[in-house]
Amino acid sequence: MCGIASRDMADDSGRPFDGLRVLAISPTPTHPTTAGNRVRFRALLDRLQDLGATVRLVHIAHEPGDAPAMQAHWTSGGATVIPFQYPAPRHARWNRFAERCRRVVGLPLQDRADVDDWYDRASGPRIAEEVEKFRPHAVLMVYVWNSLPLESLPPDILRVLDAQDVFTDRTARMRRSGVPQQWFSVTAEEEARGLNRFNVVLAIQEHEAAHYRAIAKREVVTVGHFLPLLDTGDPSHEPRLLIVASGNAVNVDGVTWFLDTVWPQILAARPDATIDVVGRVCEALAPRPGVLLRGGVDDLSAVYAQSRLVINPLRGGTGLKIKGAEALAAARVVVSTSSAAEGLEAAIGRGVVVADGASAMRDAVLRLLSDNAEVTRLSADARQFALEWNAKHAAAFDAVFARAMPAQPSR
């Protein structure tokens, strides 16, 4: 269901990374490409491979993936899967006690967690074998929690983290946003300990880059999500809205809020309006009037082509809300909460319309359903923004890996 950007970003730069070997290590698979984090990492690796690098993928299987598809796609260096088992929780007793204190007496005790709590030590020897066999010039890793083996890498290997999310006090921040998500969450000191195992940290947006710079002693480079430039034609003149989202807790919370709170108000004013919901978020949703739950689709271009506006109603989370960014590249206007627009502030007024709260979002949607000229202008601005975005972030990404290129023999 997800578009991939690098083929759409083809340029005339040739193959500047011929001879570069990159070992990519990820707890999430690149195939099937059914969630934003998978889209993100696959696009980065596609760019490296398209520019001549030999890419070998090591999937530490926190999530199941399609191993044959990954092997077939990463033709330059291949792919392998390392089994994964979550270690026994180290702080379970304390965290249960802290939760009871918060719930019963309102005492704001914090959970305890270490940056290596999700590291399966059985994977360490396998990673060492991959390094010895593949002899990479650079390692690119997604997320910080598998970073312990990097401490033993030869110092001449460039270590790059695709951070994707801020994990400092993540659970507490989600709780304050009203999102009941329990995921990886550590203190700033623990996150910094993991970040400092890398030479370069790739931040997905500027707010998070500032956080990493404040806590860690490493170079931080902002590389936003590469956007797939989909050919979708002009926005529909029909009052047809679209939400695209995976099934994580932040998405389920935001989409449920919109459908329960905002959508009935829109439908009361525009009974002819409809909304398509695409992605695994549909598995957590009940049927509602005017709502078509489409689940996963193979061709997002066709879905965007049928839509007039895209809704991004998320109320929490970190990283870059990738579906909002991709909608801009499809030349669609995005009506977004402030939270969902984080990292896309430069697109506000250039394809993104920010509306916080049910009444503001209702009014924004109804206005744009009736104003063809405004939608046409914002749609063109969105596409131009996506072109400029891709050029900027591709250049930043390429510059990081250019420094790992092996020396060319003198002639």
Image (spheres, rainbow, N blue to C red):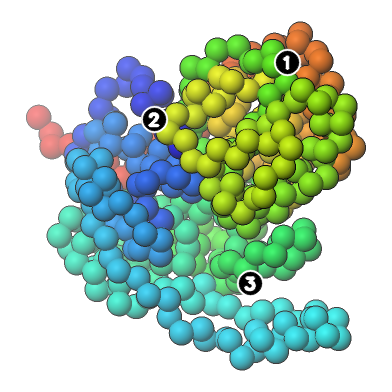
Judged by depth in the image, the label closer to the viewer, 1 or 3, is 1
Q: CA distance from mark 3 to mark 2?
A: 35 Å
Q: Which residue is mark 2?
A: 6
Q: Secondary structure at mark 3?
A: loop
Q: Is residue 36 visible?
A: no
Please give left or right for residue 37 compared with residue 211 in the image: left
Q: Secondary structure at mark 2?
A: helix
Q: Which residue is mark 3?
A: 187
Judged by depth in the image, the label closer to the viewer, 3 or 2, is 2
Q: CA distance from mark 2 to mark 1?
A: 28 Å
Please give left or right for residue 12 compared with residue 397 in the image: left
Q: Earlier in the sequence, mark 1 or mark 3?
A: 3
Q: Is residue 113 above or below residue 174?
A: below
The residue located at (31%, 45%) in the rendering is 404
The residue located at (51%, 38%) in the rendering is 225
Give the x, y percent position of residue 126: 24, 69
The residue located at (65%, 40%) in the rendering is 343
Q: Amino acid at mark 1?
A: Val
Q: Amino acid at mark 2?
A: Ser
Q: Amino acid at mark 3?
A: Thr
Dot 1: few (<14), some (14–19), or many (≥20) neighbours within 10 Å? Answer: many
Q: Earlier in the sequence, mark 3 or mark 2?
A: 2
Dot 3: few (<14), some (14–19), or many (≥20) neighbours within 10 Å? Answer: some
